Image (cartoon, grey):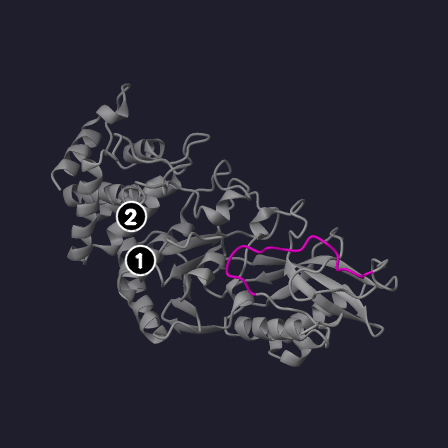
C-alpha cells in the first residue's frame, strides 16, 4: 500500500537502530527552523511533561502529527509504559545548542516542507531505584502541519553519528514494546507481553533480593532495583543494548545527565538489569534473580574509573570493574544454597583446566567473554570467592569483592590480576613482598585448590 507524505511505516527492531541519513525523496527545498521567532519547542515539551506527570494521555498526544498513525501508536505505547513506573517528577527538556538537520528517523517516511530537529532529554528518576535523575536522550523532529507546529518523528539523538555522547546510543524498553510492570518488595520487574509467568518472576525477585541483601550485609546498596525481562533474543539485544544474544543478562549502570564523563567522585546513580529469558542454561527464576541482583547492588560501591568507564564503554561493559570479580561474585552468591549449580561450576573449571584455558592469571576484561573461555572465565572468578569463603568465611569473601570494586586500580588496568592483588592487600590476605604477587602464599594456595575440585 502506498504511503502518503503524512503517513509513516513503523519498524520496531530489537537490535541497534539502522537510521536513514537521507532526506525523503521529493522533499524539495525544505525550510529549516520554526516559522516564527517564538520557539514553539519549550511549550510543547512543557505540555508533554505535565501530561506525563498527571496521566493525561490526550495531553501527551496533543502535539503529535494527527496524520502519522505510526508515531501516534508509538507515543501512546511510551506513555502507557512510563506511567506504570513510579517516576519522581519526570521532565522533557530541550538540549541547549542542538540544531541538527531535519531527517526522517523512524516513524515518518517524509517530512513537511518546513521542519526542523531538536535534541530532547527525558529526565527520569525511578523512585527508590535511582539516587538522582538520569536522562534518556532523543531527537525530536518538528514540522508545520496544516499551519500548526507538530511532532512529526522521533528517534535516538545521534542520527548523524557524530557530535553526540554515545552513552545515548541506546534503545529503551519502553520505546520498543508494550510492558507490564510489577513490584515485589524492593524489586520492580518489567516484562514484555511474551513473558507468561511474570508473577512467578516477580515473586522470585522479591525472595532473591532478601537473600542477596542478607549476603551483602551492611554495604551501601540501592533502596530498590529494577529488572527488565525479555522473552525473545531480539528484544534482549536492543534493550539498553546492544547486548549479545548468548548472554543470560546485562547490567547497565546509569549516570547523571551530562556529557557522560564522570568527576572522580561521581558514582553511578542507578542501574538497569536486563534478563534474556531465551538464553541457554538459564537457571530457575530464583537462581537467575540472585545472580543478576548481586551484580546490580554493586553500583552503590564501585569506584568510578574514567579510563574504563568513559562515555563509550560504561553502558555496554557494565560497571567498568574487573569482570572476573563481578561475574565471579555473582555466581558465588547464586550458588551459596544451590549445590547443583556449584557442581556445574566445578565441572566447568575442571574442563577448562584440562583444556589449558588457565594461563596462571585471572582474565582481563578485553577477552573475558571470548571463546573458548566464555564459560570458564566466570567460573574461575567464582573460584576465588568460593576459596576465600571456604577458608576464611563469607564475610571475608564479601570484603574482598567490595575491595575490588573500590580499588581504582592502576591507570589503564583492564581487570585481571591488577585488580586482585591490591584488594587482597586491603583485606589482609596478601603478605608484603617485593616479589611477584603470584608467588604469594594466597595465590599459590588458590591455584592449587583449583586442581582439587
* Residue that carries the numbered disc 1 in the rendered image: 280
Left-right relation of 54 to 396: right
Looking at this view, is 99 or 370 the one in front?
370
* Residue 388 visible somewhere in the drawing: no
- Assess whether residue 159 is covered by the magenta stretch: no
Say which residue label 2 marks: 329
Q: Is residue 50 above or below residue 387?
A: below
> Is 353 above or below relative to 318?
above
Relative to 302, is 14 on the left or the right?
right
Q: Which mark is residue 180?
A: none
Where's residue 160, x and y in %?
68, 49
Q: Is residue 314 left or right of residue 121?
A: left
| Number of the front mark, 2 or 1 | 1
Residue 154 in picture, x, y percent from top left: 66, 63
For the C terminus, give its image quadrant: top left
Q: Residue furthest left?
A: 452
Read off the magenta span: 12-27
Could you say which is closer to the camera, residue 123 or residue 109?
A: 109
Disc 2, SS: helix
Secondary structure that dominates the magenta span: loop
Residue at coordinates 35% horizontally, 71% vertically from top-left? 202
Query: Between disc 2 and disc 1, whose residue precedes?
Result: 1
Amino acid at each position: 500500500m502506498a504511503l502518503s507524505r503524512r503517513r509513516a511505516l513503523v519498524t520496531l527492531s530489537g537490535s541497534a537502530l539502522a537510521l536513514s541519513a537521507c532526506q525523503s525523496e521529493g522533499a524539495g527545498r525544505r525550510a529549516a527552523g520554526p516559522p516564527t521567532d517564538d520557539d514553539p519547542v519549550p511549550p510543547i515539551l512543557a505540555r508533554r511533561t505535565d501530561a506525563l506527570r498527571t496521566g493525561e494521555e490526550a495531553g501527551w498526544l496533543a502535539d503529535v502529527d494527527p496524520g502519522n498513525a505510526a508515531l501516534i501508536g508509538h507515543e501512546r505505547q511510551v506513555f502507557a509504559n512510563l506511567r506504570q513506573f513510579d517516576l519522581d517528577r519526570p521532565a522533557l527538556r530541550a538540549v541547549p545548542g542542538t540544531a541538527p538537520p531535519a531527517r526522517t528517523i523512524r516513524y515518518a517516511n517524509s517530512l513537511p516542507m518546513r521542519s526542523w530537529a531538536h535534541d530532547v532529554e527525558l529526565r527520569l528518576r525511578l523512585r527508590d531505584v535511582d539516587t538522582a535523575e538520569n536522562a534518556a536522550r532523543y531527537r525530536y523532529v518538528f514540522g508545520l502541519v496544516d499551519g500548526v507546529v507538530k511532532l512529526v518523528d522521533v528517534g535516538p539523538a545521534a542520527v548523524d553519528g557524530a557530535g553526540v555522547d554515545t552513552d545515548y546510543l541506546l534503545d529503551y524498553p519502553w520505546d520498543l514494546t508494550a510492558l507490564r510492570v510489577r513490584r515485589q518488595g524492593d524489586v520492580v520487574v518489567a516484562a514484555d507481553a511474551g513473558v507468561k509467568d511474570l508473577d512467578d518472576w516477580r515473586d522470585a525477585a522479591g525472595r532473591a533480593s532478601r537473600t542477596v541483601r542478607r549476603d551483602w550485609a551492611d554495604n551501601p546498596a540501592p533502596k530498590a532495583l529494577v529488572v527488565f525481562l525479555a522473552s525473545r533474543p531480539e528484544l534482549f539485544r536492543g534493550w539498553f543494548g546492544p547486548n549479545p544474544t548468548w548472554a543470560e543478562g546485562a547490567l547497565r549502570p546509569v549516570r547523571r545527565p551530562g556529557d557522560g564523563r564522570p568527576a572522580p567522585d561521581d558514582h553511578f546513580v542507578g542501574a538497569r538489569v536486563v534478563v534474556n529469558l531465551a538464553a541457554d542454561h538459564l537457571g530457575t527464576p530464583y537462581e537467575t534473580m540472585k545472580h543478576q541482583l548481586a551484580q546490580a547492588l554493586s553500583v552503590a560501591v564501585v569506584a568510578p574509573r574514567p579510563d574504563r568507564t568513559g562515555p563509550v564503554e560504561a553502558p555496554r561493559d557494565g560497571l567498568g570493574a574487573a569482570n572476573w570479580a563481578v561475574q565471579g561474585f555473582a555466581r558465588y552468591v547464586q550458588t551459596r544454597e544451590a549445590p547443583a549449580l556449584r557442581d556445574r561450576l566445578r565441572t566447568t573449571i575442571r574442563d577448562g583446566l584440562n583444556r589449558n584455558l588457565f594461563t596462571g592469571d585471572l582474565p582481563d576484561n578485553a577477552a573475558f567473554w571470548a571463546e573458548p573461555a566464555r564459560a570458564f572465565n566466570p567460573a574461575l572468578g567464582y573460584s576465588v570467592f568460593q576459596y576465600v569463603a571456604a577458608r576464611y568465611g563469607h564475610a571475608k569473601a564479601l570484603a574482598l569483592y567490595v575491595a575490588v570494586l573500590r580499588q581504582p586500580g592502576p591507570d589503564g588496568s583492564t581487570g585481571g590480576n591488577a585488580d586482585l592483588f591490591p584488594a587482597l592487600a586491603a583485606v589482609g590476605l596478601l603478605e608484603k613482598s617485593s616479589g611477584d604477587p603470584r608467588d604469594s602464599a594466597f595465590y599459590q594456595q588458590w591455584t592449587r585448590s583449583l586442581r582439587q575440585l
